[in-house]
Image (cartoon, helix red, strand yellow):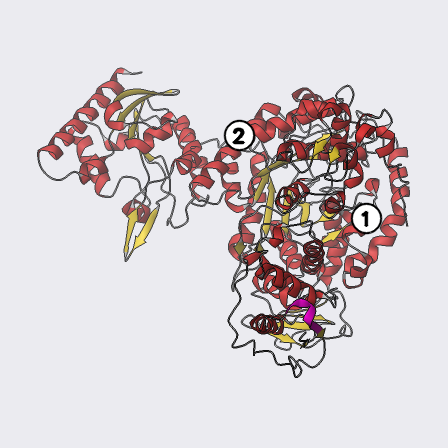
């Protein structure tokens, strides 16, 4: 690999890293066989972790960081002074194959700045995917970032090559989008999500392959004034109406060459973390956005405790819950009990009346759960209603350690 | 009380364990009567009086127990065989559902061992790195060295064989080795880290990628080490950069925050931005070029069959999809149904050359049956995939009347499923004046006789109405 290519790789990986998604899961099994290369297993694999704690699963790069758009939150906007580079289709293909053969990645996550036109850019991205699939028999994971401004027939074809398509919503409201991303159009983005969702659903019914791992999106948190509640409301709509697999939240990160429109400050990482926990409650724990918002103040989540605990502390009249009798829905509401622990409880209590010691073998979150649970040998008594319960449960914040 | 000593082989001796358990079950030996040892010479049952496990009847165990056994024998825990034997004993003695008793201490203990083995396997699949090594034959050859916690080398093999079937590779570990030559897997003895296994140029690129994808504003080494403990680092080339990445991170972030927001470059690519809005094809020829280079949705077709006829044609006929003949010749309506349509048009006084002829779907879909290719109707989903192109085509042709031949065309043009025989006649297709009639292939499928003649006459009558309607519209 010559220095020029290394240099480009550095620039175009750096330019792509603000996209949070790196998942390689959800694809149907596919094998390259004797003539091809690779496989997708459905579960996804993290091949490395960077010192920011994030998983490296896919080769996440831009085809180019030249861009005609001028989105204030983006390091690659046309008015930024950042260094620019551009890969050829063959270079991206060679990098993907080279890294894949060394077992460094599950596949490729390709995105791009808009050059010449959205259609031209989208066609170049699809050419990468098509070359990998057709000329190299590549059966690894391909995630294409769809360009919503591209012609609808190109989006129709992208799903033929990709395991997952994503279209970034970027900001939770159309008004923020208008202010910070003048070339983007919220209605158009949602129309394309609708189109992709329709195709994915039809393909599934007709047993064809069209973006088998579904579609996802990303919202930037902290670049506009949106509350957590409105962010979650947007997510809930996206899950319900457009069948999205995942909504990613990306704490707005200070970027070199920042735009003057945005305040430069450290990213609200804890807020991002709480949003992911809340998102989980929406999808797997039967919570509504309103219930989650109840746990916080003024539409913002409590940064000090997880959203389930926050909700429980404000709804103490619903506790304690008897683990030997309560149904699944109620158990899922107990702080500290995850969905997997709940399912184990339901199975185990067919064999025995569960005691505290038994629960200790089923869940790692017992410290938080204790005040909200009744077992064969435990009743929290007045603990559930103690005014200082929150203080008792909050783990003192730890200093971030650098080594 | 009888006492049995079972000595199993080094590592994950699943075969020895199965045989021993069968023998013990046949002898009715309870777990407390058995002493398990591993790692001695694999002479089973040193002098015990157990029945031979090879001839003992197989045990009927729930599938989940079998899976648990297969995984847990890979663990380094010296007690693993005794624990598994206790589990099997209880399952065979009245506790068939034991594995769902998650809070039982034995089940819990085995679940932890199982989890550890799964994690170890997962980490091997994730963190192992192949290095390109010189191959005497001049081809590509890869070698990896990895240090798993448990005896998982053979259990890890299927993943690598499936994924890297077309490569030649060796995986060396202190608990065994794997060699794949594109055809067969050989399991070899433990191996040490080979000398001089350096990083090739691609791995240097990988290291650059790893450094660049890191965001210094989010540094969190604890989270990294929880998922990627240091013990794995020695064999991962990218980890050499970690100390420097962490060390430099605070300064990089300070520099970003302290730097004044950069004055935007006054680059105002107005022309380019305006051009984006009109990225739709500018001419019918552009559109056709685009259709031609797009892949068929269902693989198999020879070529895309484009519409044919003049722009500005008064009538556009939309069929279903190209057939066998159309696919070969690359022109619409040239097969048997197309010939019938051409004849009927002539009889109805419509000049085919002056009309625009096209299909809802641009590629032939078929199932091979011997040497014949049997037409298959497009699905509703496929029809929608192609719909955009038809709409663009009509935008260029601007016909006064659009004729939907058959249900597929009617579905494309109306967006809903249409009963052709019930709704034949004038219709509205969004912006277009429309007309619904049968597809000529329907006429070909009718058995000869009065019915067929009547159907043909009705089709002719439709075409005459089409001609008159088109003349009346401006």
Q: How far apart are marks 1 and 2 (CA)?
A: 37 Å
Which residues are drawn in magenta?
A: B30-36
Residue B157 locus on image (x, y percent):
62, 66
State the mark number for residue B64: none
Determine contact: label 1, label 2, CB under 8 Å.
Answer: no
User: In the image as oriented, which residue stretches furthest toward the left?
Assistant: B450
Q: Which of B409 and B218 is in front in this view?
A: B218
State the mark number for residue A51: 1
Q: Is mark 1 on a helix, strand or loop?
A: loop
- Using the image, determine if residue A55 lies above or below residue B382: below
Residue B105 locus on image (x, y percent):
72, 54
State the mark number for residue A194: 2
Q: Nearer the viewer, residue A88 or B251?
A: B251
* Any part of residue A180 in sight: no
Mark 1 Cα shell of 10 Å, populated few (<14), some (14-19), many (≥20): many
Q: Is mark 2 on a helix, strand or loop?
A: helix
Residue B435 locus on image (x, y percent):
28, 23
* Any part of residue B433 in sight: yes
Horizontal side of A399 relative to B113 (left or right) equals right
- On the rendered image, what quadrant is the N terminus of chain B found in? bottom right
Residue A152 locus on image (x, y percent):
51, 33
């Amino acid at each position: 690999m010559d220095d020029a290519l290394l240099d480009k790789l550095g620039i175009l990986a750096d330019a792509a890293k603000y996209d949070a998604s790196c998942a390689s899961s959800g694809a149907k099994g596919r094998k390259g066989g004797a003539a091809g290369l690779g496989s997708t297993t459905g579960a996804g694999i993290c091949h490395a972790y960077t010192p920011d704690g994030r998983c490296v699963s896919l080769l996440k790069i831009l085809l180019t960081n030249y861009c005609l758009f001028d989105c204030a939150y983006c390091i690659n906007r046309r008015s930024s002074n950042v260094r620019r580079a551009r890969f050829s289709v063959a270079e991206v293909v060679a990098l993907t194959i080279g890294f894949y053969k060394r077992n460094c990645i599950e596949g490729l996550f390709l995105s791009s700045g808009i050059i010449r036109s959205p259609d031209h850019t989208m066609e170049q991205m699809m050419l990468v995917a098509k070359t990998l699939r057709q000329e190299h028999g590549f059966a690894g994971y391909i995630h294409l970032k769809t360009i919503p401004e591209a012609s609808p027939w190109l989006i129709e074809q992208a799903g033929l090559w990709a395991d997952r398509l994503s279209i970034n919503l970027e900001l939770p409201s159309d008004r923020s989008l208008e202010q910070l991303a003048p070339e983007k159009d919220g209605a158009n983005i949602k129309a394309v999500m609708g189109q992709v969702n329709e195709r994915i659903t039809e393909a599934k019914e007709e047993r064809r392959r069209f973006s088998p791992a579904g579609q996802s999106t990303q919202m930037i948190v902290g670049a506009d004034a949106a509350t957590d509640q409105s962010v979650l409301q947007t997510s809930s709509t996206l899950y319900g109406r457009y069948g999205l697999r995942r909504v990613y939240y990306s704490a707005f990160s200070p970027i070199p060459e920042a735009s003057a429109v945005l305040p430069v400050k450290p990213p609200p990482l804890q807020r991002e973390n709480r949003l992911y926990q809340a998102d989980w409650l929406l999808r797997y724990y039967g919570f509504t956005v309103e219930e989650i918002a109840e746990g916080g103040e003024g539409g913002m989540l409590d940064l000090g405790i997880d959203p389930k605990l926050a909700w429980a502390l404000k709804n103490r009249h619903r506790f304690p819950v008897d683990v030997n009798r309560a149904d699944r829905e109620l158990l899922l509401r107990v702080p500290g009990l995850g969905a997997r622990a709940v399912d184990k409880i339901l199975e185990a209590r067919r064999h025995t009346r569960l005691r505290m010691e038994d629960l200790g073998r089923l869940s790692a979150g017992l410290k938080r759960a204790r005040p909200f649970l009744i077992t064969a040998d435990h009743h929290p008594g007045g603990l559930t209603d103690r005014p200082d319960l929150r203080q008792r449960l909050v783990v003192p914040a730890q200093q971030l350690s650098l080594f | 009380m009888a006492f049995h000593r079972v000595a199993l082989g080094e590592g994950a001796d699943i075969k020895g364990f199965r045989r021993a358990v069968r023998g013990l079950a046949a002898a009715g030996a309870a777990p407390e009567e058995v002493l398990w040892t591993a790692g001695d010479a694999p002479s089973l049952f040193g002098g015990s009086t157990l029945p031979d496990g090879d001839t003992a009847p197989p045990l009927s165990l729930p599938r989940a127990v079998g899976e648990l056994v297969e995984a847990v024998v890979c663990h380094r825990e010296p007690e693993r065989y005794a624990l598994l034997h206790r589990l099997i004993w209880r399952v065979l003695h009245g506790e068939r559902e034991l594995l769902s008793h998650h809070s039982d201490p034995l089940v819990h203990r085995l679940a932890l061992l199982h989890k550890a083995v799964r994690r170890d396997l997962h980490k091997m699949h994730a963190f192992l790195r192949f290095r390109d090594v010189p191959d005497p034959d001049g081809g590509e050859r890869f070698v990896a060295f990895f240090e798993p916690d448990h005896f998982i080398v053979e259990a890890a093999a299927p993943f690598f064989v499936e994924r890297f079937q077309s490569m030649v590779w060796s995986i060396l570990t202190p608990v065994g080795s794997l060699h794949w030559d594109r055809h067969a897997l050989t399991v070899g003895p433990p191996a040490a880290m080979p000398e001089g296994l350096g990083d090739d140029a691609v791995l240097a690129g990988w290291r650059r990628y790893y450094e660049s994808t890191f965001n210094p504003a989010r540094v969190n080494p604890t989270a990294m080490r929880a998922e990627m403990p240091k013990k794995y680092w020695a064999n991962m080339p990218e980890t050499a950069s970690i100390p420097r990445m962490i060390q430099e991170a605070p300064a990089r972030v300070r520099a970003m925050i302290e730097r004044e927001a950069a004055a935007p470059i006054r680059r105002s690519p107005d022309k380019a931005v305006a051009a984006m809005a009109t990225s739709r094809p500018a001419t019918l020829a552009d559109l056709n070029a685009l259709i031609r280079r797009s892949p068929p949705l269902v693989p198999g077709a020879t070529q895309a069959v484009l519409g044919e006829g003049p722009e500005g044609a008064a009538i556009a006929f939309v069929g279903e999809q190209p057939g066998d003949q159309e696919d070969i010749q690359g022109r619409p309506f040239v097969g048997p149904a197309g010939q019938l349509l051409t004849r009927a048009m002539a009889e109805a006084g419509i000049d085919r050359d002056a009309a625009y002829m096209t299909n809802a779907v641009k590629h032939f879909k078929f199932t091979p049956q011997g040497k014949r290719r049997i037409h298959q109707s497009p699905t509703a989903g496929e029809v929608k995939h192609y719909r955009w192109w038809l709409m663009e085509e009509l935008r260029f042709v601007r016909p006064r009347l659009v004729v939907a031949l058959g249900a597929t065309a009617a579905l494309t043009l109306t967006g809903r499923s249409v009963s052709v025989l019930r709704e034949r006649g004038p219709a509205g297709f969004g912006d277009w004046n429309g007309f619904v009639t049968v597809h000529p292939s329907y006429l070909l499928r009718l058995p000869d006789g009065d019915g067929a003649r009547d159907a043909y006459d009705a089709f002719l009558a439709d075409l005459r109405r089409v001609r008159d309607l088109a003349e009346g519209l401006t």
